[in-house]
Image (cartoon, coloured by chain):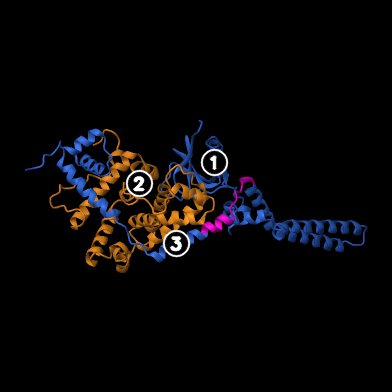
Chain colours: A orange, B blue
Amino acid sequence: MRRTGHADERDDRSLVTAAQGGDRAALDLLLRRHYDRVHAVCRRMLHHDQDAADATQEVLLSAVRGLARFDGSAAFGTWIYRIAVNACLDEIRRRSRRPTAPLEALEGSPDLLLSGDHRDVPFDRTVVDHLSLTSALAELPEEFRVAVVLRDVADLDYAEIAATLDVPIGTVRSRIARGRAMLARSLGAAGIGADSSDAPELRVGNQTDPADRPKGQP
Amino acid sequence: MTTPTGPDLPPDALVELASAVVDDALTPAERLEAEASAEVRELAERFSAVRVRLGEPIPVDPSRRDTHLAAALAAFASDHESAHVVSFESARDHLARRRARRLAPVLAAAAALAAVGIVAGSLAGRGSDGTTVTADATAEVSAEASSLARSGEAPEVATSPETAADDRLDPMAAATSTGSGDAEAGTAPLLEGTAPTEIPALVAAALEERAAARQPTPEASCAKVRGEPIASITWNGAAALLTVAPSVDSPTEAFVIDSLTCSVIASATLGS
């Protein structure tokens, strides 16, 4: 697992309890702790900087307004990522009803790409990597993209993703595998991340989840 | 030296196995199978690289993050200051009060007009012994008009803290009073439930409301919900969607969907 400890020793559960009791500082810490990952989920799902920012804002507000109803049966992270997924799916639906902008226009600015953790990476490589990954993600069928993002960005396990998407665990496993295969193929073709020169050919069958197929079908 | 390959796997199975290796989600039998296949191992390496790339931090504009957090905290402060539980009954009473407030000026005006009409009629018919009766009737109607006007204005003039909080908080009142005049048009208040045992009754009530066209078909705020939506409801005080499956015409199952997370939070099997 890649989940790491936080500077503040209080765990999410105690922060949630404090926030539900009106502790503003606890809520601030809780949201700050999950902000970057919520933003990453939105950014990866929507591959559009401004839409991702808007969705992130919406997620925070929804979480704040729904906090009183959060019963702790799931981890706070799972809960807020679920809100994020729904906000992003809503945005995707809205987007499908309006004209789309070309991919180049959807990207963040180079300045932003070079900020933070990317400052020590050569500019050209950063931008090319970023564009290729974004393009590859954008090409994935939505159900594969959502599953892969929840696993590889939000770091949810199969059971949590299954609960979030309301699908069986077998379907989650299949969607993640197929999504990764398609991504690896796209990124391999772009010469990024997964060198495909010696790797076996990635054969991704049709886009129906095996788990969704009627029994007896290949 | 070549790496030994394992048993021939169909492409889908191979991809799934390699992906499960990355996630350490293998059964013992799958683990043996994966370890025996060079192809699976190579694919797993590529998938790991994809996972690493996807998991890399995405730069966040710090000022934007601060703005977002500030807005969320402001919403929290606003909600928390005015937070108290509003029961369905009080919400319904509140709706009735609002309806009365809105209708009061209209009723008062109508009553005043009626009074004027009666006075005018009596003046036209003066000369008989009807004067006293007419004066009494006018006084009575005027008093009624004044009473209606007073009852309509009273809650706004002397707003209690509770009523004021209702005005700010009550989503049902807000939903039914925003411009369209739904309350006056006869839209039924939202149904409310708290336990799965109440679901069959909620379904019956919702279907009745739909049949009477008092409740519009709800627009699902979730991309995908289980069942067919039949009503927007409140469930333990929170916004939710009531759905039935397999169809509205012959429902055998009902679900309560949380409007925020879009997940099923309660369900019930319906009797035939």
Q: Could you say which is closer to the camera, residue A214 or residue B264?
A: B264
> Residue B44 appears at what percent x and percent y?
21, 45
Residue at the disc numbered 2: A156
Q: Label 3 is placed on what type of residue?
A: His
Q: Label 2 is placed on what type of residue?
A: Leu
Residue A22 magenta-drawn? no
- Distance CA(mark 3)–CA(mark 2): 24 Å
> Residue B30 appears at what percent x and percent y?
23, 35
Residue B249 visible from this viewpoint: no
Residue at the disc numbered 3: B68
Residue at the disc numbered 1: B207
Q: Nearer the viewer, mark 2 or mark 1?
A: 2
Q: Are both tags, 1 and 3, on one chain?
A: yes
Q: Quadrant of residue B181?
A: bottom right
Q: Quadrant of the N terminus of chain B?
A: top left
Circle 1 packing at 10 Å, graded few (<14), some (14-19), many (20+), is some
The disc numbered 1 marks a residue on which chain? B
Specify the segment rendered in magenta.
Answer: B75-89
Q: Quadrant of residue A99?
A: bottom left
Q: Callout 2: helix, strand or loop?
A: loop
